[in-house]
Amino acid sequence: MTRIPENERDIIEQAIYLPMLLTVLQRDLSVVEKSPFKLPKPYQHLIESTIREVQKELAEVKRYLHKNNIRVERLKSDEIFTMYLFLYKGYEEHHNYFNPRLRNRVEELMSLYLSPGSFHKKSASALPIDVQTGAPPTR
């Protein structure tokens, strides 16, 4: 059983998913830059602005984790699972994540970030932090 409340676990998981999303977006950006699109600039701008937004939210997550003395470390990975260590208020917890689930969640986040007019929706749903206080919202 986990000692980490659900709302804080959501924030911790953002520290896992957002770097993965950045990696995918940066790879996609390099593919777009090398592709023979007739008009590549709109695609580049879309991906670049999405990267900036993800970086901002990842910075918020990292500040929250640092402020609350929470750490996330990737321990090991195989073809099926990736294990992470969560250090939370003096407790250590090991969590296994099914690799296809990680990929699917990153794909969901990518769809959310790239959908038109979604930047305001993301802040409310993908990153459960009150921007003014830096604390997770009460549920």
Image: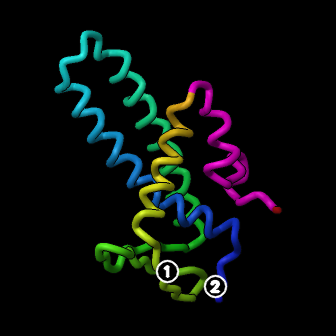
Q: Which amino acid does label 2 sit on?
A: Thr
Q: Nearer the viewer, residue 138 or 35?
A: 35
Query: Residue 121 location, x and y as percent?
Result: 67, 37
Q: Are marks 1 and 2 in contact (CB under 8 Å)?
A: yes
Q: Which residue: 60% across, 33% down? A: 119
- Sequence-first disc among 1 and 2: 2
Which segment did they paint magenta? Answer: 116-138
Determine if the magenta segment contains residue 95.
Answer: no
Classify 10 Å Cα crowding around label 2: few (below 14), some (14-19), many (20 and above).
Answer: few
Q: Which of 73 and 37 is in front in this view?
A: 37
Q: Residue 2 carries which label?
A: 2
Query: Residue 107 location, x and y as percent?
Result: 46, 48
Q: Which mark is residue 112?
A: none
Determine if the magenta segment contains residue 134.
Answer: yes
Classify 10 Å Cα crowding around label 1: few (below 14), some (14-19), many (20 and above).
Answer: some
Query: Residue 2 location, x and y as percent?
Result: 64, 85
119 with respect to 80 (left or right): right
Query: Residue 139 location, x and y as percent?
Result: 82, 62
Q: Residue furthest right?
A: 139
106 with respect to 44 (left or right): right
Q: Is the magenta stretch mostly helix, strand or loop?
A: loop
Q: Is mark 2 on a helix, strand or loop?
A: loop
Q: Mark 1 points at which residue?
A: 95
Above or below — where is 10 with respect to 56?
below
Q: Which residue: 62% across, 51% down? A: 127
Q: What residue type is labelled 1?
A: His
Marks 1 and 2 sit apart, C-alpha to C-alpha, by: 9 Å
Residue 49 image-quadrant placement:
top left
